[in-house]
Amino acid sequence: MLVNPAPLPVTIAPVVGEALDGYLERLAAANALPHPVLVQRLFEADAPTAFLTIAPAEPLVANLAALTGLDADALRCCTLATIVGIDTDGLDPANKNTWRRVAARGWPPTHGTALCPRCLRGDGVWRLSWRHPWVTTCAEHRLWLIDHCPTCGRRFRSHRTPIRAVDTDPDRCGNPRGARGRGCTQPLSELDSIAAPAAVLAAQRRIDGALQGRPVTVHGDLMEPRDYLRELKSLSVLLLHLAAPPGGEELVSWADLARADRQRSAGEKGARWGLAPPTNLQLRGQALAAADEILRATGLDEAADLLPPWTELTPATNDGQLGWLADHTTMTPLLTRVVMAATASRRRLATLLDRNPEPLLVSAIPQVLPAAVYNQHVARMLDVTDHTGRLFVSLCLARQHPGTATWADAATALELPAELGTKTARACSAHLLAPSSEFIAALARVANDLDPFIDHRVREDDVRRLARSRGWYRPWAHIHLPGSHATSQQYAITWLWTQYAHGHTDTSPGWQHPPSRHDRAHYRAYVRRLGPAATDALIELVDDSTPADRRTA
């Protein structure tokens, strides 16, 4: 190492997020130094030159700090070793064999870099994150990164020298090509950019946050960035293995890409995605996005609802489903919990519900199934209270509709609290007495008995409208329930809500606050006083408030 290396005439600071090799080229340009001259000054006294952008040797960093007058830590920030997800522990730049320790941990950075043409066109800065295995898109410009030059066919900046050996135009590829002193002349500004899907960009933004050291929300709780990337990798690897066999194309559009990458990388034991990610950035990005969707779920139950379509693709082996899944990724504690929950019997029911090609319109599904229909078709199949069972059947019918991928989605579609859907499904699925196939058949009979022309959302709106109006209760009560206090209007509304609109008791617009045990008891006592004439008159009241052009019965 130089004892007192002469500083360069011009010093420029690295841009935040800039890769070290790109910074060195900008430094050379600022000082009008040919690349070979800067390299010679930088690596005097035999400072190791390997792993420049990953984890450079300390003598090299010290030389560069002396040449620029910058703090060594600021220069180290231009290397991958400072970014979450890259573990360089045990790497010795003076001994290239130590790289095996890094590679054995899985998903190490590869030689060269990807790029975003629009970023380079804007400021000419080569981002360090483009080299990160978890980065596949530019979230700012919503584009897929490009990692191979269409002219030379190699990854960008895949030269063996610390920086590009030839002083090429910054807008050119510059990869070595044949004769010494000649580089690839592909203009980077002319590269074709492809828009990335919204789901991939959403995942990339969460990944970018993790790379910047910010905790990431996983199943409703904040997770440390390093742990999030580890979970994301393990789940992505599993989804890649599940998508590659026949049938994967029915689930995801990138199954063919996974199949092709598996053939490229498969050894005697098959594809080794746990050690190296797919080389195709679009395949990698879509697998990461699919995994992140499951990690982004609000809780374990919702995550487990999203996984069964994948686990249904598990090949039949002597090891069984769980054995195969465990053999094809690193089963972290979190992933183990999700897989165990997803393969439970109640999840198989959810998978069957997702396969109905002709679901009933959501508007024709009441929040709580009418008691008569429930008793005729389903009551003996569930070991739960009738009200809970009727709610569960309605959730099952809603779950069959496109766009309701989880029980929480099904509840939301029926204008019920999302958590109510998850809790009800958990309770009822565990107490299903009949085989799932028989229960699905019973649901079909239930759907046939429901009138598709009755819009229960409209009925609910009609009851809400009557609940907001005043002046009707006293005249009705004077005839049908003498002595009833005006505050008992809430019970009349709740009766209409549960018997006319077939809504859930707790969501009745009659309640001024969530009903307590005493409220429910008073309501039941009130209902026992209602005769047929009183209930018929209530229904006439709500019908009279309904616009004539809307059919609700």
Image (cartoon, grey):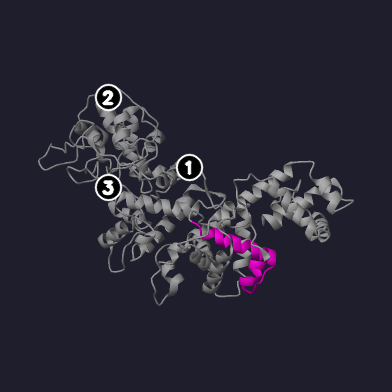
Magenta part of the chain: 372-401
Q: Is residue 398 left or right of residue 81?
A: right
Q: Is residue 378 magenta?
A: yes
What amino acid is found at the position of numbered circle 3 in the picture? His
Estimate the x, y position of residue 122 in percent, counting from the top left: 32, 29
Tag 3 near tag 1, CB within 8 Å:
no
In the image, 137 versus 212, the foreground residue is 137
Upstream in sequence: badge 2 or badge 1? 2
> How many C-alpha atoms fall within 10 Å of the one at disc 1: few (<14), some, or many (≥20)?
some
Classify residue 443 as left or right of residue 2.
right
Q: Secondary structure at mark 2?
A: helix
Look at discs 2 and 3 and give the one toward the viewer. 3
493 sits left or right of 299 in the view: right
- Viewed as shown, does residue 48 lie left or right of 453? left
Q: Is residue 147 visible?
A: yes
Specify the quadrant of the image occupied by residue 421: bottom right
Q: Residue furthest left?
A: 179
The span from disc 2 to disc 1 (Cα, nearest Å) is 32 Å
* Relative vertical location of residue 181 with respect to residue 218 in this rendering, above or below: above
Q: Is residue 90 visible?
A: no
Q: Say if the magenta span includes residue 364.
A: no
Q: Earlier in the sequence, mark 2 or mark 3?
A: 2
Amino acid type at circle 2 is Ala
Residue occupying the point 35% across, 46% down: 136
How far across and down, in percent of the image, does residue 19 sit?
A: 33, 37
Q: Earlier in the sequence, mark 3 or mark 1?
A: 3
**CA distance for labels 2 and 3:** 26 Å
Mark carried by residue 111 = 3
In the rendering, which numbered label is found on residue 317? none
Label ID, residue 213: 1
Distance from disc 3 to disc 1, alpha carbons, whole Å, reads: 24 Å
Q: Which residue is mark 2?
A: 30
